[in-house]
Image: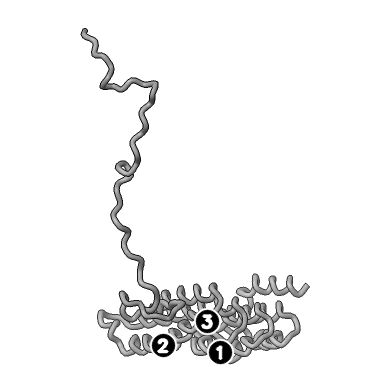
Amino acid sequence: MRAAAAASLRELVETLSPEPALRDGLTAALSGADPVARAAALDALRVLRLGDTALFADSLADSDVTVRIAAVRALVSVDAAEVLARAATADPSREVRVAIAKALATVADGRLAATLSAAPGPDRLHSPRLESSLTEPALIESALTELVDDPDALVRAAAYEALGRAGCPLPWPDARGRRCPTRPGRYGPAPPPPCPSRTPASRSLPSPRPSPTRTPTSARPRWRH
């Protein structure tokens, strides 16, 4: 029954009016016993823009994984990069850490796009607002770099993808922790050497063995016409 009500709330949430009374009811649902109801309340607060960073950050300590993932989505809607960065490696769930890595990349993309659109003119790449927005993602880069060393392979893959989306330099970690000599500033094994030249397949294949029952062409008699 509660699961059906939560599904109906998600489908009809855009038809609701964001009123203070509705916010109070959804906030009260966050302390309920049913995790499905708590996750649905977070989604409704996010869509209706009735929540803030402090409200959503409290749900990161929820005991249910689904609720914490819903809290991550809600924190993206309020652009809470600092809260997400602090929680990147603190959550014991692999699914939550993957969600945080993707969320950090989304926040970084949104901030850069908003800054570029708000700075018109040919000199927007040198505007003070853009420079401040580019120095701010240092916290995001630090959190994603820590996720690169996560023991779970799915988390590491999500962190690499997020670093690429956020425009951060990839650390290229190696199991031996050695700096790559062929790529300054990068870590990881050197690229494989180029493949040596090989003999074409037509030359390397052995010639077919002659058939003992077939007369060679050069030995056939020539008939005069």
Q: Nearer the viewer, mark 1 or mark 2?
A: 2
* Residue that numbered label 3 is attached to: 76
* Residue that numbered label 2 is attached to: 138
Q: Relative to 7, does residue 204 appear above or below in the rendering?
A: above
For this rendering, which residue is in front, 139 or 175? 175
- Whole-percent x and y of residue 61? 64, 88
The quadrant in which the N terminus is found is: bottom right
Mark 2 surroundings: few (<14), some (14-19) or many (≥20) residues within 10 A: few
What residue is drawn where x is 44% and y is 79%? Answer: 176
Callout 2: helix, strand or loop?
helix
Q: Residue type at mark 3?
A: Val
**Mark found first going from the N terminus, 1 or 2:** 1
Q: Residue type at mark 2?
A: Ala
Q: Residue type at mark 1?
A: Thr
Q: Specify the quadrant of the image occupied by residue 49.
A: bottom right
Apparent side of residue 82 relative to residue 119 in the rendered image (left or right): right
Q: CA distance from mark 3 to mark 1?
A: 9 Å
- Whole-percent x and y of residue 94? 59, 77
**Mark found first going from the N terminus, 3 or 2:** 3
Apparent side of residue 7 relative to residue 178 in the rendered image (left or right): right
The quadrant in which the C terminus is found is: top left
**Mark found first going from the N terminus, 3 or 1:** 1
> What number is the disc on residue 53?
1
What residue is drawn where x is 49% and y is 81%? Answer: 149
Q: Specify the quadrant of the image occupied by residue 67.
A: bottom right
What residue is drawn where x is 37% and y is 32%? Answer: 209
Asked if residue 65 can be seen in this view, the reply is yes
In the displayed orientation, state which residue is furthest to the bottom: 54
